[in-house]
């Protein structure tokens, strides 16, 4: 009885990848648009594979050691990869450079809670009464 | 005769040049020192200890230039309905001495202590002290427990209560993390001074390297007495006040 | 009297009803936490001055009571008092359940609750919160092993060494909880070494009160009656702990006034702070200390049915009042950054803050109790946690009243 059950389970496990590949065609792959010509800081395949490591490594160096002007900077990425369709942001559904792939891969983007996704963004000035006692 | 004229002219020219050179060196020693970190790949130097001296005698009660400049530079411009939930990295405190009635005003911000209680209590080490003395919050690992806000004797830290969209690209700040004055680290690392110091029109704020005996701030600290707020806590603050 | 192994339909239904209530309370609280995390703490009553609010009151009660409820087991296993030995397993279950509830509330209130893994992988050894990342999971593990040694016959010889380990561990843990506040050198309300032992004594009182309530409910569910001698022992012990808490709180306030000279703060808490004096004198002192002591010790009243349950409930109510005053009162009073001067600013320096708890905070806090309740209901249903006293054996050994 248990042997039958186990073999059924095994068959299901083997069948699953096939099931997946049948469905793979239903989700469109993101179309990555590079609006600015030129080279990225590393070849495309290396960027695709390693960009998370590069960002994480550099962020700790900038944060903890105060290293500036390194090869990898988040603002550098944003300035180059921001899309005109998304009002100069790297987010914006399937048109945003970062969001398009990350939505497809279902990897949550934690960066943009804190980092400004719009390239060259200039915030408004503070209110003139700021800091004066109410 | 012509010799003496040339000599005098030469002498005057040489003196003028020397005076200008000395004047430049005397006026802007801080810039020379901070330049060190701005080169590519260079990191903050442990030989430097950044500090701020505030002469409260020159601080006008009605002036909030430092506060406005900080908010503009660091992108603290979001609309928060409840003023008690609004982030403020620097604020002007109006003080009245209870016994004498003497009134004065001063800006208060993160004191960038050498023994920061906020760094001691942070469970993840997100609150940390950089080698040049600036106390920062690493928002990549801040979990928003607010223990550092409980520990700070100066109420220096703020908590971001709502999602933000108007951040300055140079100053990441976001929902659920704690933040405080960074001495405008994005400016300091480029050899500039903090926005509040630049904006102060009365010359009340002096910023520089406490470890350099020839810096403006060190000279002023030697000339007149200064205090640390809550010196009894022995935190060795980087921000010193005169005239409290 | 043996434990029932078969339940009639009413009892079966009662289990599912209790499970449903506990599950519902928990689910609503978790929903509130999700809301708070999505919208940000802007939807709460907490702000830049009152940074820890109602959820922390609930969480700290649960965590401190969790440590204290294990006391019942310690008295049996570590100090060898026979009547407490059958109660050890239930005490362990309550410890795990309440600790889980308290920790859930604290962790869900975090500004970035999604970074819990970060909290576990980045460790700051100077932070009490950092120690807690080791102490709390360790507590779960040790108590789980302890329950195992109690319930499996061949493991029983190990129950004493494990009990001693659990005893020491929870002293460390509760010292840590008290030190969370005690190490805050700049705060008028805290900054005192007495907070560590005070929290330990508070844990003893609150833990025993919770235990008495749960024990009473379980006995009622099983149509059992607690033997008067055991009841008397336990109620007297609760009275001793409540009196000890009174002592520590008195010493804490007197020290704050006399030695630390925090007169303005103490006046705020004890005299003119509005809700804080009310909760202190009316809530903690009268309802939470004097009334329970009267109920527990006055001969006519203490013998009445339900008196111990009433006293336990009052002690717990007093605990909440005390924690509210301690945590929130301590934050509402402004930090004294410039002693001898009156301060005012746009960041509300020098001003007493008012705190109005919001509904999501309350629901989150209550869900901590819900989690503890649900875990206990399931635990006592599936395993034999009911204390079963062999009265004859106790009487013969003379340990019923030793």
Image: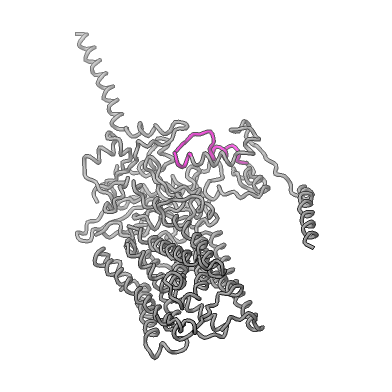
Q: Which residues are magenta?
A: A61-83
Q: Is residue B58 visible?
A: yes
Q: Is residue C356 visible?
A: no
The picture places residue B202, in percent across and down from the top left corner, at 29, 44
Q: A49 or C402: nearer the eye?
A: C402
Q: B143 or B186: nearer the eye?
A: B143
Q: C334 or B199: nearer the eye?
A: C334
The picture places residue C326, in percent across and down from the top left corner, at 37, 68
Position of residue C39 relative to residue B53, above or below, is below
The picture places residue B126, in percent across and down from the top left corner, at 45, 49
Quarter holding residue C23: bottom right
Q: How many marks?
A: 0
Q: Is residue C193 left or right of residue C153?
A: left
Which residue lies most toward the bottom here?
A: C300
Residue at x-position 61% and y-position 81%: C4
Q: C238 or B115: nearer the eye?
A: C238
Q: Is residue B195 left or right of residue B231?
A: right
Q: Is residue B115 magenta?
A: no
Which residue lies most toward the front here?
A: C396
The picture places residue C334, in percent across and down from the top left corner, at 34, 62
Q: Which coloring applies here?
A: one colour
Residue at x-position 48% and y-position 39%: A61
For the N terminus of chain B, give its image quadrant.
top left
């Amino acid at each position: 009885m248990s042997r039958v059950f186990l073999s059924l389970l095994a068959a299901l496990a083997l069948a699953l990848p096939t099931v997946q590949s049948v469905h793979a065609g239903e989700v469109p792959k993101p179309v990555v648009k590079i609006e600015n010509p030129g080279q990225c800081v590393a070849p495309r395949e290396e960027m695709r594979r390693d960009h998370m490591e590069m960002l994480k490594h550099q962020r700790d160096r900038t944060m903890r050691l105060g290293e500036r002007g390194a090869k990898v900077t988040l603002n550098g990425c944003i300035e180059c990869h921001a899309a005109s369709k998304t009002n100069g942001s790297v987010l914006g559904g399937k048109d945003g450079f970062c969001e398009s792939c990350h939505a497809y891969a279902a990897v949550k983007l934690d960066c943009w809670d804190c980092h400004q996704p719009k390239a060259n963004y200039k915030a408004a000035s503070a209110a003139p009464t700021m800091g004066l006692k109410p | 005769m012509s010799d003496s004229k040339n000599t005098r002219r030469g002498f005057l020219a040489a003196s003028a040049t020397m005076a200008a050179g000395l004047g430049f060196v005397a006026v802007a020693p801080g810039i020379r020192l901070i330049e060190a970190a701005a080169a590519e790949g260079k990191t903050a130097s442990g030989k430097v200890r950044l500090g701020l001296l505030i002469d409260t005698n020159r601080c006008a009660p009605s002036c909030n230039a430092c506060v406005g400049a900080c908010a503009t530079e660091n992108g603290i411009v979001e609309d928060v309905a409840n003023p008690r939930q609004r982030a403020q990295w620097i604020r002007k405190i109006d003080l009245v001495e209870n016994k004498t009635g003497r009134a004065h005003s001063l800006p208060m911000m993160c004191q960038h202590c050498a023994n920061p209680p906020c760094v001691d209590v942070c469970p993840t080490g997100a609150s940390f002290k950089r080698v040049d003395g600036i106390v920062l919050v690493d928002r990549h690992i801040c979990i928003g427990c607010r223990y550092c806000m409980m520990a700070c004797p100066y109420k220096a830290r703020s908590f971001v209560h709502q999602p933000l969209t108007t951040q300055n690209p140079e100053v990441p700040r976001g929902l659920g993390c704690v933040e405080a004055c960074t001495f405008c680290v994005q400016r300091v690392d480029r050899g500039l001074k903090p926005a509040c110091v630049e904006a102060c029109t009365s010359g009340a704020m002096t910023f520089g390297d406490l470890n350099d005996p020839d810096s403006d701030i060190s000279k002023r600290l030697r000339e007149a007495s200064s205090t640390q707020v809550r010196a009894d806590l022995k935190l060795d603050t980087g921000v010193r006040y005169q005239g409290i | 009297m043996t434990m029932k192994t078969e339940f009639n339909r009413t009892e079966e239904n009662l289990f599912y009803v209790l499970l449903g209530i506990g599950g519902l309370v928990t689910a609503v609280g978790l929903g509130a936490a999700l809301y708070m995390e999505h919208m940000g703490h802007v939807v709460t009553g907490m702000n830049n001055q009152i940074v820890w609010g109602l959820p922390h009151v609930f969480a700290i009660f649960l965590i401190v009571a969790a440590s204290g409820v294990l006391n019942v087991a310690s008295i049996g296993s570590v100090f060898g008092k026979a009547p407490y030995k059958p109660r050890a397993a239930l005490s362990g279950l309550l410890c795990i359940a309440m600790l889980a509830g308290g920790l859930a509330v604290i962790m869900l209130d975090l500004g970035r609750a999604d970074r819990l893994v970060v909290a576990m992988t980045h460790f700051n050894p100077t932070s009490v919160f950092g120690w807690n990342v080791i102490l709390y999971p360790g507590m779960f593990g040790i108590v789980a092993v302890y329950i195992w040694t109690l319930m499996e016959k061949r493991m029983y010889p190990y129950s004493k060494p494990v009990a001693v380990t659990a005893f020491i561990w929870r002293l460390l843990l509760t010292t840590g909880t008290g030190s969370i506040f005690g190490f805050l050198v700049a705060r008028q309300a805290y900054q005192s070494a007495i907070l560590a032992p005070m929290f330990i004594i508070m844990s003893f009182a609150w833990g025993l009160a919770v235990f008495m309530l749960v024990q009473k409910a379980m006995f009622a569910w099983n149509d059992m009656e607690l033997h008067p001698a055991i009841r008397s022992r336990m109620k007297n012990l609760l009275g001793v702990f409540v009196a000890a808490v009174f002592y520590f709180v008195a010493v804490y306030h007197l020290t704050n006034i006399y030695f630390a000279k925090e007169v303005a703060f103490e006046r705020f808490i004890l005299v003119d702070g509005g809700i804080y004096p009310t909760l202190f004198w009316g809530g903690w002192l009268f309802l939470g200390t004097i009334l329970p002591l009267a109920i527990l010790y006055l001969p006519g009243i203490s013998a009445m049915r339900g008196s111990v349950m009433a006293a336990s409930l009052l002690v717990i109510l007093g605990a909440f009042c005390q924690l509210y005053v301690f945590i929130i009162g301590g934050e509402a009073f402004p930090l004294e950054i410039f002693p001898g001067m009156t301060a005012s600013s746009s960041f509300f320096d020098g001003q007493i803050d008012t705190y109005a708890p919001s509904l999501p905070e309350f629901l989150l806090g209550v869900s901590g109790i819900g989690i503890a309740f649900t875990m206990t209901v399931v635990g006592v249903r599936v395993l034999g946690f009911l204390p079963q006293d062999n009265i004859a054996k106790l009487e013969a050994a003379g340990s019923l009243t030793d």
